[in-house]
């Protein structure tokens, strides 16, 4: 049984974005963060010692996994309730707001270590 072409076209972008988000989530770890994580890779060793990379990577992974799940649900729900045009707008707004939240939390003091060992 072949899927209708319009169904595939409506979800192709979502599938590609989800694969990218999942690759980011599962691909980044403590070993390669020093090369791949923007900002962390340019920090001095003293600043790296004051940054809680373990908990940041836990937050990072959870954020991208949740972003994948909830953005997909929001897109599918909006597509069911509205037209494709409005579903894309709702999806885009959700992603923008999510990344604003991510930037605010990432740049806050949550992952700073006061007295590194």
Image (cartoon, rainbow, N blue to C red):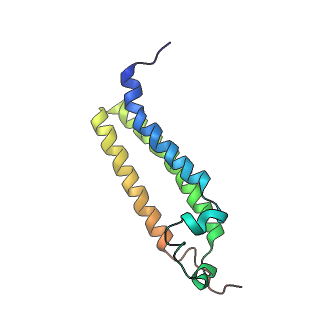
Residue 79 on image: x %, y %: 36, 33
Tell whether 113 sits left or right of 69.
right
Image quarter of residue 97: bottom left
Q: Looking at the image, which is closer to me, 6 or 72?
A: 6
Determine if residue 72 is in view. yes
User: In the image, what residue occupies the spot 50% across and 12% down?
Assistant: 1
User: In the image, what residue occupies the spot 54% across and 50% down?
Assistant: 66
Q: Looking at the image, which is closer to me, 95 or 35?
A: 35
Tell whether 89 sits left or right of 54.
left
User: In the image, what residue occupies the spot 61% across and 51% down?
Assistant: 26
Image quarter of residue 53: bottom right
Determine if residue 73 is in view. no
Residue 113 on image: x %, y %: 62, 81
Q: Is residue 72 above or below residue 57?
A: above
Question: From this viewpoint, which residue is outermost toward the right?
Answer: 117
Q: Looking at the image, which is closer to me, 48 or 71?
A: 48
Q: Looking at the image, which is closer to me, 114 or 4?
A: 4
Residue 117 on image: x %, y %: 72, 85
Residue 82 on image: x %, y %: 31, 33
């Amino acid at each position: 049984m072949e899927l209708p072409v319009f169904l595939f076209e409506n979800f192709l972008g979502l599938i590609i974005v989800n694969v990218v988000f999942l690759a980011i989530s599962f691909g980044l770890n403590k070993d390669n963060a020093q090369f791949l994580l923007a900002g962390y890779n340019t920090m001095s060793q003293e600043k790296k010692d004051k940054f809680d990379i373990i908990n940041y990577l836990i937050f990072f992974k959870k954020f991208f996994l949740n972003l994948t799940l909830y953005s997909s649900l929001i897109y599918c729900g909006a597509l069911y309730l509205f037209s494709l045009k409005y579903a894309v707008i709702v999806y885009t707004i959700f992603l923008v707001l999510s990344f604003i939240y991510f930037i605010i939390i990432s740049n806050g003091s949550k992952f700073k270590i006061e007295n590194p060992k």
